[in-house]
Amino acid sequence: MRLRLVKQQTAFDFFEKWKLWLGVSALLVVLSIASTVTQGLNFGIDFKGGTTIRAESSTPIDVAAYRQAIEPLALGDVSIAEVFDPSFRDDQHVAQIRIQAQDGQEAVASDVVAQLESSLRNIAPDIRFPSVESVGPKVSGELIKSAVLAVVIAIAVVLIYIWLRFEWQFALGAVGALVHDVILTIGIFSALQIKFDLAIIAALLTIVGYSLNDTVVVFDRVRENLRRYKKKDLSDVLNLSINETLSRTVMTSVTTLLALISLFVLGGDVIRGFVFAMIWGVMVGTYSSVFVASSTLLRLGVKRDWSKPSNTDGNQFANIDA
């Protein structure tokens, strides 16, 4: 028995209320920008500056116990993660402790590091700190600029790729959907004041890739159907194309979400922010592929005199190579 979340043949009219969908997206984008401007992001140590300490001991790492021991020191934002490496000895257990910059200081003072070591010795008597590294506000500012530049370059490259592969109308539709996804993801982090660090930047770039893949599959089917149904209205061709790829879109999104939700529940605090961004990004990216990218294409229009069909036309997988 083959599992299907959506019937193979569907005939939903995705553009009956396209103005409503674009209006909802525009409202969410405005709210996201307003939240980011007014209350900002809850930047993590990567962007605020702080100190990273490598702790080693022969006692197995207990992150909860470490956190409980450090809590009385009131150091603010503290991140603790166990480090795994195949080259470690059996009795070598390593943790990475990251502490935010303290008020008026670029790095954690040496006496605070000493207090930290003293507190952790109650759990791991032979604990030592072979590496203590600080990241100042200037470096953090450069990291923010680099992160923004990475996202902008990724979207610009996508614009050029889609433009060369299809037409400029497709490129604007795809990039509009990507910008929509990135802004809404940043907005939800601002609204909920979830910690925003370098892992979230990685999530944003992953979301760009995921959303683009979804959009390109739909656009490939649109191009194929534009060749096949030269007399149909553009809205009918778009509806047909989305319905034909709907089963694939839903199945891909649901299976991805199942894996991400499992990671969110069982993966621990270290990756929870990254996984939350991915869950949100997959949902928003699936929505934008259908309602933002395609609606933008409908508004911009597209030429119908495509080059002669290739030998693969007529095959259900024709021209879908992305």
Image: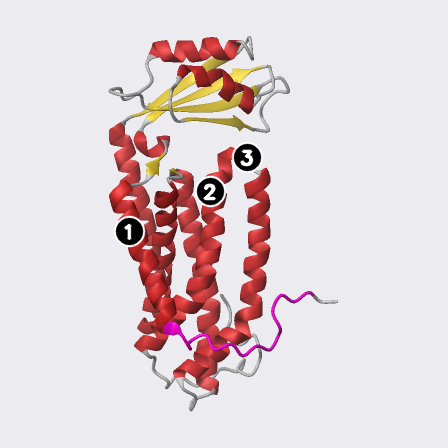
Residue at image point 59% right, 49% down? 259
Q: Nearer the viewer, mark 1 or mark 2?
A: 1
Residue 142, quarter of picture: top left
Query: Is residue 82 located in the magenta-colored stretch of the structure?
Result: no
**Mark 3 residue element:** loop
N-term mark: 3 or 1: 1
N-term mark: 3 or 2: 3
Comparing 245 with 22, the one in front is 22
At which x and y percent is residue 212?
43, 61
Query: Is residue 4 located in the magenta-colored stretch of the structure?
Result: yes
N-term mark: 1 or 2: 1
Q: Residues within 10 Å of mark 2 (few under 14, many from 20)?
A: many
Residue kind at label 2, given as amino acid type: Phe
Magenta stretch, main secondary structure, is loop
Find disc 2 in the rendering and name its residue. 274
Residue kind at label 1, given as amino acid type: Ile
Residue at image point 38% right, 20% down? 75
Q: Is residue 53 above or below residue 231?
A: above
Residue at image point 57% right, 22% down? 62
Find disc 1 in the rendering and name its residue. 33
Q: Nearer the viewer, mark 3 or mark 1?
A: 1
Residue at image point 40% right, 39% down? 194
Question: Which residue lies most toward the bottom here?
Answer: 231
Q: Residues within 10 Å of mark 3 (few under 14, many from 20)?
A: few
What are the residue bounds of the magenta stretch? 3-18
Q: Answer yes or no: is residue 272 visible.
A: yes
Residue kind at label 3, given as amino acid type: Gly
At which x and y percent is residue 155?
34, 57
Q: CA distance from mark 1 to mark 2?
A: 21 Å
Find disc 3 in the rendering and name its residue. 268
**Mark 2 residue element:** helix
